[in-house]
Amino acid sequence: YNYLAPRTTQVVPDLTIATDFGGGKVSLLRADISPLASNALTITVDFQPLQPLDFDYNVFIHGFDALGNRIAQWDGQPQRAGEADPMTTWMIGDIVSGNYVLTPEGDRPISDVKSMWIGLYNWQTGERLAVNGDDKVILSLDAPAAAETGP
C-alpha cells in the first residue's frame, strides 16, 4: 500500500495563561498569536491589574529561534486600542487588551520564531517583575498549547 503523508499546517494556539507578575500586581490572562502576511506575528495580550499600580512598567515580547537566539523583539509601554496605555492609568479588574507586532531581524522568516518570552520590566532600571519564580512567561510555538515559566 502507498501511504500518503498527512497534510499539516502549523497552528499557533490561543493560550489562556492566567499568571501573576510582581507578587500579584498584574495578571497575564491570555496571549493570542496570529501570523501576518508581512513576515510578522501579531500577539494579542490581555493583562489585568490586581491592585493599584504606582509605576508604568514596560512590556517585552522577545522571539527566539530553535537554538535559543533572540531574533525578534518588541519593548515599550503596554498598548490598548493601538495606543500606549501606561499602567498607572489602569483600573483594578479592567482587562487591558493590546496588540503587539513581532518582526524578525534581518531576512529571517517569521517561521524561525519557535518560542517567545513575555514579561514586564522597570524601564528605568531594567529590572523585570517576577512571575512564578522567573522573570518571564515562555510560550512555545512548536508544541501544542504550551506556556511555562521557569528557566
Image (cartoon, rainbow, N blue to C red):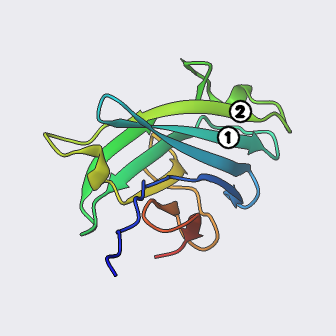
The answer to whether mark 1 and mark 2 are in CB contact below 8 A is: yes
Q: Is residue 108 above or below residue 18?
A: above
Residue pictured at 49% horizontal, 53% vertical: 11
The image quarter in which residue 22 lies: bottom right
Q: Secondary structure at mark 1?
A: strand
Query: Quarter of the image containing the C terminus?
Result: bottom left
Amino acid at the residue labelled 2: Val
Rounded to the nearest angstrom, the CA distance separating label 1 from label 2 is 5 Å
- Element marked by disc 2: strand
User: Going from the N terminus, do you reach mark 1 or mark 2 first?
Assistant: 1
Counting from the top left corner in percent of width and height, residue 14 is at: 62, 50
Residue drawn at (29%, 45%), measured in percent from left and top?
Answer: 110
State left or right for residue 96 relative to residue 4. Answer: right
**Where is residue 26 shown, x and y percent of the image?**
72, 48
Question: Residue 146, percent across and down?
Answer: 56, 67
**Residue 141 in the figure: left or right of residue 88:** left
> What is the quadrant of residue 56 in the picture?
top right
Residue that numbered label 1 is attached to: 46
Label for residue 96?
A: 2
